[in-house]
Amino acid sequence: MTALTHSAQRLLDKLDGFRVEIDAGRKRADIVLARPPFNIISMFQRDQLRLVFEALDEHDDVRVIVLRAEGEHFSSGGDIKGFLEATPEHVSRLAWNIAAPARCSKPVVVANRGYCFGVGFEISLACDFRLVTETTQYALPEQKLGQIPGSGGSARLQKMVGITRTKDVVMRSRRIPGQQAYDWGLATEIVPDAELEAATDRLVEELVVFSPLAQRTAKKLLNDTEDASLSASIELEGHCYSRLRQSHDFKEGVEAFHGKRKPTFTGN
């Protein structure tokens, strides 16, 4: 395994409730929630998760990041007591920390089984690909505490499934089963529970084959144009296409296509 470094290494010296596994040979990094059975996410852990995503984004040996968890539940949510003890400044950073997967330029895959509540759901919504099983249950249950989602959950969910469904989920603290999440377009794929790891492996193996430059460009383009008008989105897409046309990866892709061989992309 390759070591993980970051400018804020002091905060990463002892990871709280999770670990990081880097497999340079497979061009993959796994962030593994490791506080079973419910993998409750502490306030300090949120800071560390952000830093880890930033460090992995700069890591040359990593092309795809996987967020997963030990045990039968992804995460039942945050540490409730931690909210009462946190300073207003710390609370104000919650959404920024949990948005780290979306800001990361590399593809982020999350594997969700069992409970995926509160911040567990919110950080999953910030990922690019969500894999679920028949045991998965998504929820934003903050109304039961006299609160609302505070890390971007209701906003992201509304963008994905609309205001009517989001009000039903948020205002009633209603759970979304895995199959329904897939039917609504929240999940990329639904697989039997025993096949979640294999499905994750297959998706990672598929993603690492593509040009990292083209993938970074596609992710940023799609994120940046989510709220843009159609004409502005088409204009920006054209500029991104033009820039990629000058890249070594595009030249390699064209030559490989005509040469009937697999391309070797370098990200240049």
Image (cartoon, rainbow, N blue to C red):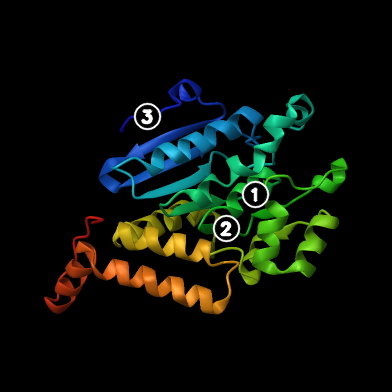
- Residue at 34% from the left image edge and 50% from the top image edge: 63
Q: Is residue 217 above or below residue 115?
A: below
Q: Report the amino acid beneath label 1.
A: Glu
Element type at mark 3? loop
Residue visible at 38% across and 58% down in the picture: 216
Whether residue 241 appears in this view of the structure is yes
Q: Which residue is mark 2?
A: 132
Q: Nearer the viewer, mark 1 or mark 3?
A: 3
**Mark 2 crowdedness (10 Å alpha carbons): few <14, some 14-19, many ≥20:** many
Which residue is denoted by mark 1 in the rendering? Answer: 122
Residue underneath mark 3: 5
Residue type highlighted by circle 2: Val
Instruction: Report the side of 59 relative to 164 (left or right).
Output: left
Question: 142 and 91: which one is in front?
Answer: 91
Amino acid at pointer 3: Thr
Splitting the image into 4 quarters, where does residue 156 fall? bottom right
Left or right, 6 with reference to 111: left
Nearest-to-viewer mark from 1 and 2: 1
Q: Position of residue 106 (x, y in %)?
A: 40, 52
Question: Which residue is drawn at the image coordinates 72% and 60% (left, top)?
Answer: 176
Q: Which quadrant: the N terminus?
A: top left
Q: Earlier in the sequence, mark 2 or mark 3?
A: 3
- Position of residue 16 measured from the top left corner of the image (x, y, whole percent): 56, 26
Query: Does residue 148 appear to the left or right of 89 in the view shown?
Result: right
Asked if the residue at tag 3 contacts the one at tag 2, i.e. Cβ–Cβ closer than 8 Å, the answer is no
Who's the residue at 36% across and 41% down the image? 58
Looking at the picture, how far across and down is residue 210, in whole percent? 30, 62
Q: Quadrant of residue 169?
A: bottom right
